[in-house]
Image: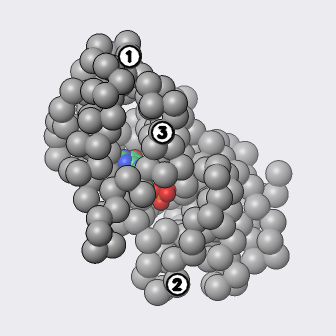
Amino acid sequence: MRKLETRTIVVASHNAGKIREIADLIGPFGFSAKSAAELKFEEPEETGTTFEENAAIKALASAKASGLPSLSDDSGIVIDALDGAPGVYTANWAETADGTRDFVMAMEKVEQALAERGATTPQQRTARFVSVLCLAWPDGHTEMFRGEVEGVITPAPRGTQGFGYDPIFQPEGYETTFGEMSAEEKHGWKPGDAQALSHRARAFKIFVETCLET
Ligand code: IMP
């Protein structure tokens, strides 16, 4: 495992929700970071079929463009009753005809697909959020960190916090959806804590423990 020896990195993302969450997570470690969106890097096409492949595509594109270590996140929601869909295509389910993203529509699509399968009880609506963080160096070396959180898809969206599919995901052991949690509650982690809650915070905790010189 290669260690990250600098605190100057690029957050290889164009997704405002993810950039905000990664900024929260790296904040306490004294990073100086700009995002690929701020640096106006072109968004690479995600042609992979796994979270790992897509995370590597994004981190390597940014590391090459910036000459700096770059941290990407590829993530999505995996729904058992839909045979793992939308999975790596989670963002695509939100795409509209004019090229923008509409997550109210995407959450309705999920509900419709579950209704078509007759998945009405919580036991039939199990799902997990997955986040794969990839740290890539300009020389092409990569390290991956995977985090997952189990939960259920709620019958209707609840809450306005977070981003994307947060309002329909209720993590196991909680009465609230990610959309009803503050950012701190959703991460469920700060440096030194034994556990994290969100998929992204779980992946980040592995990154800190294995790769970061602290
Ligand atoms: P990608 O990683 O850019 O391919 O897109 C990931 C997709 O999953 C986006 O549509 C996000 O909205 C969704 N997603 C990933 N993580 C979260 C999360 O923490 N909350 C809600 N939606 C998420």
Marks 3/2: CA–CA distance? 29 Å
Mark 1 within 8 Å of ligand 1, using the beta carbon? no
Q: Position of residue 93 (x, y in %)?
A: 38, 53
What is the three-letter code of the residue carrying label 2? Answer: Phe
**Residue denoted by label 3:** 85
Mark 1 lies on a secondary structure that is helix
Mark 2 lies on a secondary structure that is loop
Q: Residues within 10 Å of mark 3 (few under 14, many from 20)?
A: some
Mark 3 within 8 Å of ligand 1, using the beta carbon? no
Residue placed most toward the observer, 124 or 12: 124
**Residue denoted by label 1:** 124
Q: Residue at x 51, y 30 (%)?
A: 83
**Residue denoted by label 2:** 41
- Determine which quarter of the picture holds residue 73: bottom right
Mark 3 lies on a secondary structure that is loop
Q: Residue at x 53, y 49 (%)?
A: 88
**Comparing labels 3 and 2, the label whose residue is closer to the camera:** 3
Q: Position of residue 160 (x, y in %)?
A: 17, 47
Q: Closer to the N terminus: mark 1 or mark 2?
A: 2
Kindly identify which numbered label has been placed on residue 47: none
